[in-house]
Image (cartoon, coloured by chain):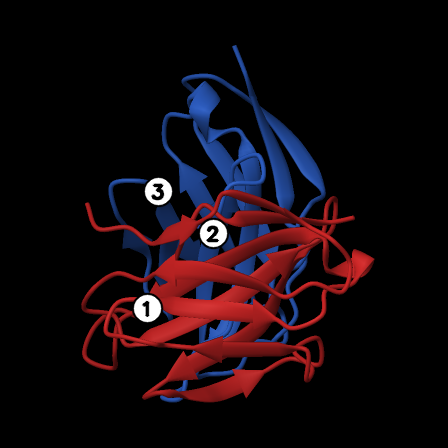
Chain colours: A blue, B red
Amino acid sequence: DAKTTQPTSMDCAEGRAANLPCNHSTISGNEYVYWYRQIHSQGPQYIIHGLKNNETNEMASLIITEDRKSSTLILPHATLRDTAVYYCIVRVFKAAGNKLTFGGGTRVLVKP
Amino acid sequence: EPEVTQTPSHQVTQMGQEVILRCVPISNHLYFYWYRQILGQKVEFLVSFYNNEISEKSEIFDDQFSVERPDGSNFTLKIRSTKLEDSAMYFCASSEGLSGGTEAFFGQGTRLTVV
C-alpha cells in the first residue's frame, strides 16, 4: 500500500471548516484513499473513502486531486467533538480482506 | 445503528496467564479483524479472518495468538501466555463482503494490562 504524509498537528476554530491535507504521491491506479479518525483512544471511526471522484457524506467531504497524488478531507463546520487524530490511509481493495495500515495521522484540536 | 461490541472493556491479567478478548461484529459482516494500540503508539494490524480462516496476519501475530469464531456471532482473540509487552488496547473490527462497502467498523476496544 502507498505511503501517506500528513501534518503532525493542526488547530481549527469551532464552526469553521477544517481542511486536512494528505500527500500520497506514490498512489497506484487501483488504490483507494480512506480517512479514519480516533477520538481519545476510542476505536478508529470510518469517515469517508474515494478512488478518483470527490465524495461527500454526512460527516465530511473528500477532495482528490486530478493526478490523485494528494487529497483533502474537509470537515465543513468543525465542532469541539471533532477533536481527534485523523488518519489518511491508501490501500488496494482485496477480496481476501482489507487491512488498514495506520500512520501517525494529524492531531486536530478544535478550539472554541 | 449497528455497532461492533467488545468485552471486557478492561482486563488485568498476570504475566503468563491466558486471556480471551471477545467481540461481537456487526451481524451481516463477513470480514473480521483485530488491531492493537500500545499506549502512545500507532494502531497496528494483527489479523484478518474470512470464511472461517485467517486471511492475513502480521508479524506481531505469532504462535501465542489465535482467533476463533466459535459461533455465528462471536469473534475471539486468545493470547496463550501473556507478556508485559502485550499490554495495549485491542480493537476488533468488521466489514461487509464484496457486494457491500469496504470500510471497517471498529469496536471501542479492550484495554489489556499485563502485570
Task: Please determine whether, in this image, residue B38 is positioned above or below residue A80.
Answer: below
Per the rendering, the mark at residue A36 is: 2
Q: Residue at x 53, y 82 (%)?
A: A28
Tell which subunit mark 2 falls on.
Answer: A
Tell which subunit mark 3 falls on.
Answer: A
Q: Quadrant of residue A22?
A: bottom right
The amino acid on which the numbered mark 2 sits, given as a three-letter code, is Tyr
Q: Secondary structure at mark 2?
A: strand
Q: CA distance from mark 1 to mark 2?
A: 14 Å
Question: Can the viewer see residue A10 in this picture?
Answer: yes
The amino acid on which the numbered mark 3 sits, given as a three-letter code, is Ala
Q: Is A31 displayed left or right of B1 in the figure?
A: right
Query: For the residue carrying disc 3, how many other residues have a C-alpha within 10 Å: few (<14), some (14-19), or many (20+)?
Result: some
Q: Nearer the viewer, mark 2 or mark 3?
A: 2
Q: Quadrant of residue A84?
A: top right
Asked if marks 1 and 2 fall on the same chain, the answer is no
Q: CA distance from mark 1 to mark 3?
A: 20 Å
Per the rendering, the mark at residue A60 is: 3
Q: Secondary structure at mark 1?
A: strand
